[in-house]
Image (cartoon, coloured by chain):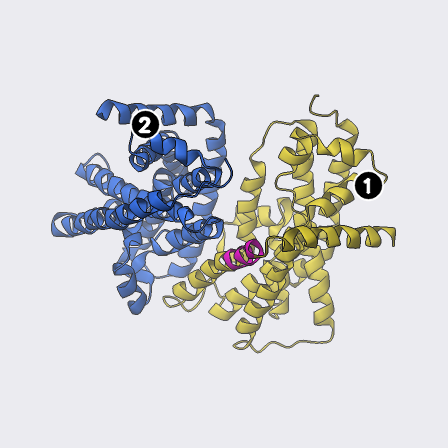
Amino acid sequence: MFHLRLFIEYFKQYMKTRLEYRWDFVAQFATDFLFQAVNLVFILVVFQHTKSLNGWNQSEVIFIYGYFLIPWAVFSAFFNLWDFNERYIIRGELDRVLTRPVHSLVQVIMETMSPESLLGVLTGLIVMGYAMTDLHLHWSWTDPLLFLLFTLGGVAVYAGIYIALTSISLYTDSKTDIQPIIFNIGSYGRYPVNIYHRVIQFALTWVLPFAFVGFYPASFLLDQEQWKGYALITPLVGAVYLAIGITCWNRGIRHYRGAGN
Amino acid sequence: MLSMYWEVIRIRFLMMLAYRVNYYSGIVIYSLNIGVYYFLWMAIYGGESSLQGLTSLQMATYIAVSWMARAFYFNNLDREIAQEIRDGTVAIQLIRPYPYLLVKVFQGFGEGLFRLLLFSVPGMIVVSFIFPIHLPGFSDVWLKFALSLLLGFIVNVQVNILTGVCAFFILNNQGLIRAKRVAVDLLSGLIIPIPFYPEWAQLLLSYLPFQAISYLPSLVLVKGLAGEEFVHAILIQAAWCVLLWIPIRVIWKKARKTLIVQGG
């Protein structure tokens, strides 16, 4: 309850600062949308030359892509840890955070959140909806529930991995470029994994499980039986990776010595 | 005069060299991008040996070459120029005894040269071990590619400068810069080679400068364009190099008159 109140306060402050620059707000949304549009154009164009992508038709690939956008949007709204190193370690803001009586990670998340990214959920739903006009899917009563669980699982996978990566900054203040590398690996998860080499499929499932963010859950919602087992353990994989991330963070905080004066 | 520009190139090259560690991760990132598009395109080819005049082997090579070429022509001149306009340092630049935009071009060239030698070449070697691609051996194709690549670089620099100097009129043009980057990646043939677009889009793209940046240079190398085809490709690129210079001159002239330095 306390955390929720805190969150609302942070949110109010955030909206005040953002609405001061309304046009930036609109411009950011427009360019984000453009980025997604490029990927959609890619799918639409290539399907003029093929009927299927290893057994997946155009609408299915678009559906998977649209689904992927949803956990991604939630993740980028609340885990905006990209410039953690710069802002909290080098400029020393973490010292301020550590003197306060709320868990450091919770504070950092609330200070860096960008709730406007949640609009991406809408984009994702529109893309999925567009794909579904062409697909005859059977939605049982459990599906919306699973959809929610899958989304949370996907967000947790992303969050866990990025929290773990951010924790590296707690040990060294030198810049690492590992985050953009992992970000690019993440984009592998938005296409059907069976197009990739077996080694990559394995890595996307068990090492950096980005396939659980987009492909596995989406294939379940597409009524594909083949990956059902994987889809159903999505929340579990998410929980495991989130736990790993938080453990890394807590250990890192204990190790943290500050960046100097 | 020429020695000055040589110095500009050299200094930018050395500046990049100081931060060379950043580029190892760059190679990994580009390889990952090549990877995702390689697998996507191979799945698109499926059993087909050739689509739209490109065999699957040529397609794989095209993806690798066009991404590694991007490392050469890509630069942030638009962002730099916009930044200098916004923080007012452009005023200092303008009173210096050199043509501002031309110096920017050569700075970009120094940066490109650095990436070509320390990023594209090693990256290409790495990629050729991972993916089955076919590059021509020692032949004049490489010279033709170098010429085409250079023209592609010039067109891209011009597009960047055009975007950058818009900051004279739109004071916050971050959105425009990002939109331009996406547009260039999509429309230059980097993500989708031009012949894969529907007819109407191909027609439209043939009237736009973007194909000169990535599609034509990559095609020169991958298909080993010769004779008339090669000359045609080079002429298109050269024509854009000349044509794009006009709006830049016009806008630049106007912009210098309307310059407002925010803060000081």
Residue B107 falls in which quadrant of the image?
A: top left
The x and y percentages for residue B169 are 41, 50
Amino acid type assigned to the residue bearing label 1 in the image: His
**Picture quadrant where residue A1 is located:** bottom right
The residue that disc 1 covers is A103
Q: How crowded is mark 2: few (under 14 residues within 10 Å), some or many (20 or more)?
A: many
Camera-nearest residue between A91 and A183: A91
Q: Nearer the viewer, residue A45 or A109?
A: A109
**The residue under label 2 is which amino acid type?**
Ile
Residue under pointer 2: B9
Secondary structure mostly seen in the magenta stretch = helix
Query: Vertically, is B253 above or below A252?
Result: below
Q: Which residue is drawn at 36% across and 23% down?
A: B11
Callout 1 secondary element: loop
Chain of the residue displaying label 2: B
Q: Position of residue A189 (x, y in %)?
A: 56, 54
Out of A52 and B124, give the one closest to the viewer: B124
Compared across the picture, whether B48 is left or right of A9 comes to left
Residue stretch in magenta: A23-31
Q: Residue at x 65, y 29 (%)?
A: A90
The crowd level at tag 1 (other Cα within 10 Å; few <14, some 14-19, many 20+) is: few
Identify the element where label 2 is drawn. Answer: helix
Question: Which chain does yellow denote in the image?
Answer: A
Q: Which chain is blue?
A: B
Seen at 68% across and 31% down, the residue is A89
Specify whether residue B199 is in view: yes
Marks 1 and 2, Cα distance to the nearest angstrom?
50 Å
